[in-house]
Image: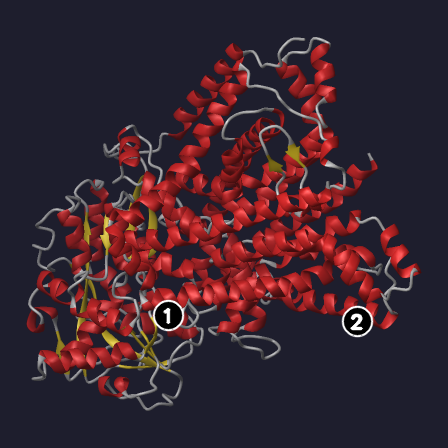
Amino acid sequence: MSHPSLSPRRSLAALTLLIAAWLTACSNVAASAPSGSGESTVLSIVGYAVPAEANARIAEAWQQTPDGQDVTFETSYGASGDQSRNVLNGQPADYVHFSVESDVTRLVDGGLVSPDWKSGPNKGVVSTSVVVLAVRPGNPLGIKGWDDLIKPGVEIVTPNPASSGAARWNILAAWAHIAANGGSDAEATDFLKKLLGNAVALPGSGRDATTAFTSGTGDVFITYENEAILARQSGADFDYIVPDDTLLIENPGTVLIDAKPAATQWLDFVLSDQAQEIFGETGFRPLNGKAPARVEGANDPESPFPQPQRLYTIANDFGSWEELSKTFFAEQTGIVTQLLAELGKS
Amino acid sequence: MIREPRPLKLALRWLVIGYLILLVLWPVSLVVTNTFADGLTNLKTAFTSPAVLSALRLTAKVTIWAVVLNLVFGVGVSLLLVRYDFWGKRVLSTLVDLPLSVSPVVVGLALMLVYRRDSAIGGALYDLGYQIIFATPGIIAATVFVALPLVIREVVPVLIEVGDDQEQAARSLGGSGWQVFWRVTLPSIRWAVVYGVVLALARSLGEFGAVKVVSGNISLRTQTATLAVEETYANFQQGTAYAVAFLLTVAAVACITAVSLLRPREDAS
Amino acid sequence: MTGTALAPAPVIRDEVIVEPAPTAIRSVRAQPRYHRRLTAASGLGLGVAVLWLSLLVLIPLAAVVGTAVAGGPGAFWAALTAPQTLNAIGLTVAVAAGIALLNAVMGTIIAWVLVRDRFWGRGVLNVVIDIPFAMPTIVAGLVLLSLYGPRSPIGVNIANTRMSVALAIAFVTLPFVVRTVMPVLEELELDVEEAASSLGASSWVTFRRIVLPSLAPAITSGVALSFARGISEYGSLVLLTGNMPNRTEVVSVRVLSHIENGELGSAAAIATGMLVIALAVLATLDLVQRKAARHDS
């Protein structure tokens, strides 16, 4: 009786052919040489969670101009820290728009972004906003400012500082509320501890936190002003308060070293008045200070960006992002990291 | 045969019907109602969005790849497990069953650790021109992983039941290995293969957790339909989320209905 | 349908393939014996299969364990015993186990009604049972959110509560016990039941003494599969439970959090714990099938 067998030679041949076909079809790392003019370019934007809508509208406007005519976009949005780590791990990107400067610094250290990325007049910042407190319609708990947040029983929603940029802005604003008004570090730490103790959820990103709040979690939601405005523009039902003292949010945006040439033109457009007005329409405070005539979703659409009595900034009140990242958010020794571990949350 | 008292019989029947309606039927029907709440608007918005269309195309592409790969390897591994002897057969069998009990997030983590650009294997592959993580191959790998056991678990019992007498007969009549496989073995397991393929299809269409970790969620490039549902829901576009969810539900129900309709025909033959 | 896919896999020993007890009443001795050694071609096939499985399954899972222990036992233990993680593990295991037991009861009842009862719509229910298996998990979450969330048409809102965790897991594990029990019920020889009732045993006694023991292996397999699926569930919980730390956060969400925070060592530590549980479940299934197979022959 003959042995059951497929002809070994035939199987090997078939296998080799299959593998060869598969290998040729699958090679997917794009050549880094930029495409010639006249061909369509694809720009990859990797961003933090909330500017998706703003960037989409700005992209549409840019595509009407000669510079942006042949350009299409691939976009990826998520928690700022997470996205930054992904780019470091190989996620393709030409232009990054993150929430906090430290997420760009990570890429500088990784050799993906030039060290002089913030040497321009805008210092690397492409969008700005302030920290606000969102509350349920009618503000049932009567929240007026930061001190009301640490009252017992107030349920706070704020994102997770390890992955989210928004979370870091929120925490720094809370810290400044005490420390920049003459409070000691110990008092500020205590304030933060009470605040984080009241947190009932630490979603991964600023956008996830919005979803959690609008789905019914928590009484107060600490977020970017632009996110509160955009959510209300899109039909979410809640109120928000701009506290008397709050922190100026500055979001960095830059192109990578190996980016396609069109990315630099894109960045120039993002900094232009036209793009900044579009940012304004989605709730950001334009870099040039000129608010659009009407911003739906703002507390007062005709006067959407009230000036707080006291506006803290990183430059004035915290020094530099390098220092504060280490002080507050370092993995084992950061103030916030330790607080969260103590509170049993992370 | 146990004849339970009629009231008990009726009570059990209605308990089951009630449970299934409250747990499955009613919630699923709400997807349909919510999708069509504004008539066809939600579907129109979804189908004119380039991101959604790209996500659907990507899901289709990944699903086809995953099903074909699991079909080839599923049938092959089934044959090996049932018709041959070798050392490590039980280890192989356990390995094949593992994906059923592993969390999809763990699957994503596992693939990411091995194939990201930082790692030894991933870095080498990248230098050769292949990106796995944050690109389509990673998504395919994750989907193949989770659907791995499905074809095998359908085919193995049938291979055992059918026995190898016909195959032996064919061989003794001079058939080559390939002829025996193609003309005798495959027809005898064809329905099991069909069920396995359909189940793998449904599972591959719906993979979410593992893909979330390995894909980077790049709209127009690595965002699948399931990721699109999550993102559009969070980005204040709930209508679109429901529309895509509706499509995926229809596909899933179509798969299992197909299998359910096909099976009686097999019993008859 | 998902029947055979969810039925316990046949136990494969070196010489004889033992039929999984719940699906065959034939004695083991009647099984043909396969002593076929590998030929060149099938050896090549085995090599390819092993390579494929290594690249896809073995090496990645080994990498998880490797990363978990790379930081030393201290870091490993710290990741697993962090208070938030312990709460997540406790919640996940408790709910999965509870729902698995619920499925043992409800699944058996559903199987019983589908096999032994005749009514209009039975065929539809048969398909309905498989929907949770085929449906994408994120859609399942959306689906449950529609009926049991803030916009519920019947005013039931359990989103962001522990009940929602139970609900989601009950949904996705629905088919498991049903599909393992149904084939056994269908194959049961009725003479023994008839004999018992003709001897005067009540329905309940007959059920308890005759039918239930035959179903026990199938129910156990279904429960084990349901538990394994329950502890690893992720997609359906994302939208529905709020993922609130120490309250409604499950293990999969913890792992993802660690991944997003760049803490791969901690993620891998928890993942390794889950893998150990998964292997334990598979081992249990294996044991149950062997015992049942011996019992049958």
What is the quadrant of residue A72 in the picture? top left
Mark 2 residue element: helix
Q: Residue at x 30, y 36 (%)?
A: B122
Residue C59 position in % (x across, y down): 38, 37
Number of labels in the image equals: 2
Depth check, front residue: A126 or B6 = B6
The chain holding disc 2 is: B
Residue at the image position 17 percent from the left and 52 percent from the top: A106
Between the residue at mark 2 and the residue at mark 1, the CA separation in whole angstroms equals 40 Å
Question: Within 10 Å of the Cα at label 1, are there few (<14), some (14-19), or many (20+) other Cα atoms?
Answer: many
**Nearest the camera: B117 or C90?**
C90
Q: Which residue is mark 2?
A: B11
At label 1, which amino acid type do we have? Answer: Pro
Q: In the image shown, does A142 or C138 lie closer to the viewer?
A: C138
Rendering coords of residue C110 (x, y %): 72, 61
Q: Quadrant of the C terminus of chain A?
A: bottom left
| Residue hosting label 1 | C245
Residue A238 position in % (x across, y down): 39, 80
Q: Residues within 10 Å of mark 2 (few under 14, many from 20)?
A: few
Does the image show residue B4? yes
User: Do the residues at pointers 2 and 1 share their chain?
Assistant: no
Residue type, numbered disc 2: Ala
| Residue depicted at x 60% and y 51% | C134
The image shows residue C81, relative to residue A141, as above or below, that is above
Q: Quadrant of the N terminus of chain A?
A: top right
Q: Secondary structure at mark 1?
A: loop
Q: Position of residue A152 (x, y in %)?
A: 31, 88
Q: Is residue B250 left or right of residue B144?
A: right
Left or right, C201 with reference to B255: right
Which of the 4 image quadrants contains residue A298?
A: bottom left
